[in-house]
Amino acid sequence: MDYTEALGWLDEQEGGKDVANAIRNHVTGLNKEAQSWRQKYKGATSEQATAATELEQLRTENSQYKTRIQTLETSETELKSQTSNLHQQLQQAKTDLETEKGNKQTTEASLTEAQTKVKTLETQIAENATKLTALESEKQSLTRSLGVNEAATIAGAQPKVLQTLLKDDHQIAVENDKVFVVQGETRTELREYADANWKAFVPALFQGAPSPRLPEGGPKGTETKGNAVKKTLGNLYSTPTVKGA
């Protein structure tokens, strides 16, 4: 006797129709609850996949930051060395120019050449100084972004949101796996600072994929109904005893 046959048999028994309907309603409720859990689990799985993708993108971004910072540091070192050499050449060029000026046999052409060399070296040094400033600025920006990304990951915050909220006078510090916002001599734990200063943005800052917790067993109804149905189903699938056969 299968489930449908069992309910059909119960419908025909005296007072059995109400019990059969209770069973049908309970099973329908269980099916709906199971469907709800499946949908929640599917949604949570999708959110977890999105979170995993975002985390991988963040790791890639951080790796690119680190690579770029290393490149900038190498360029900075080379440029400083080149500039130091140019300063030495400039010093010698200025000495040569003064010598030309003091030499009675100096021609106008040689004097112009000496002056041009000094100006050329000064221009190169000025250009290098501009390049160094740009390199340092980019390096500081990338270092800050990298630090914010890593701090956000530790704090469970959204890196892009944190990047947007932080101002130039904000510094981020990480100590003992805790993230602090530093302003001057004041340091405040990130969550506390956000609650006090970025209250409207806290949900966006600390949003995250929920961790689905599915029930260990099947969904349960009320204790009374569950026990009654369990007993009834047990009777249905045992050999029924019919009086007056």
Image (spheres, grey):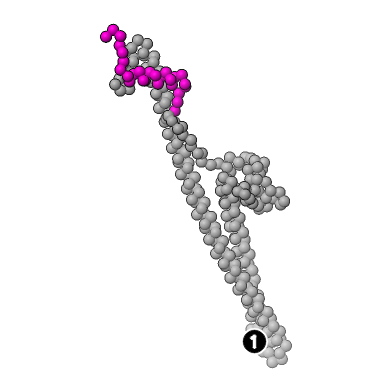
Residue 172: x and y, percent?
64, 51
Residue drawn at (33%, 20%) of the image: 237
In the rendered view, would you say 240 is above or below 104?
A: above
Front residue of 88/216: it is: 216
Task: Locate residue 224 relative to residue 139 in the image: left or right.
Answer: left
Q: Position of residue 1 (x, y in %)?
A: 29, 21
Instruction: Say if residue 123 shows up in the picture.
Output: no
Residue 142 within the segment the image draws in magenta: no
Residue at 64% x, 84% y is 113
- Judge the density around disc 1: few (<14), some (14-19), many (≥20) Cα neighbours within 10 Å: few
Q: Residue furthest bottom?
A: 105
Between 92 and 104, the one lying in front of the other is: 92
Q: Could you tell me which residue is drawn at 59 percent across and 67 percent down?
A: 76
Magenta includes 232? yes
Q: Is residue 93 visible?
A: yes
Q: Amino acid at mark 1?
A: Ala
Q: Which residue is mark 1?
A: 109
Horizontal and vertical percent position of residue 7: 33, 18
Q: Against 100, is 135 above or below?
A: above
Is 197 displayed left or right of 53 in the figure?
right
Residue positioned 55% across, 41% down in the render: 207
Quarter of the view holding residue 191: top right
- Residue 164 vs 107, above or below: the answer is above
Image quarter for residue 110? bottom right
49 to 100, vertically: above or below: above
Q: Pick whichever, 62 or 117, lies toward us.
A: 62
Is 72 on the left or on the right of 44, as rendered? Answer: right
Range drawn in magenta: 219-245
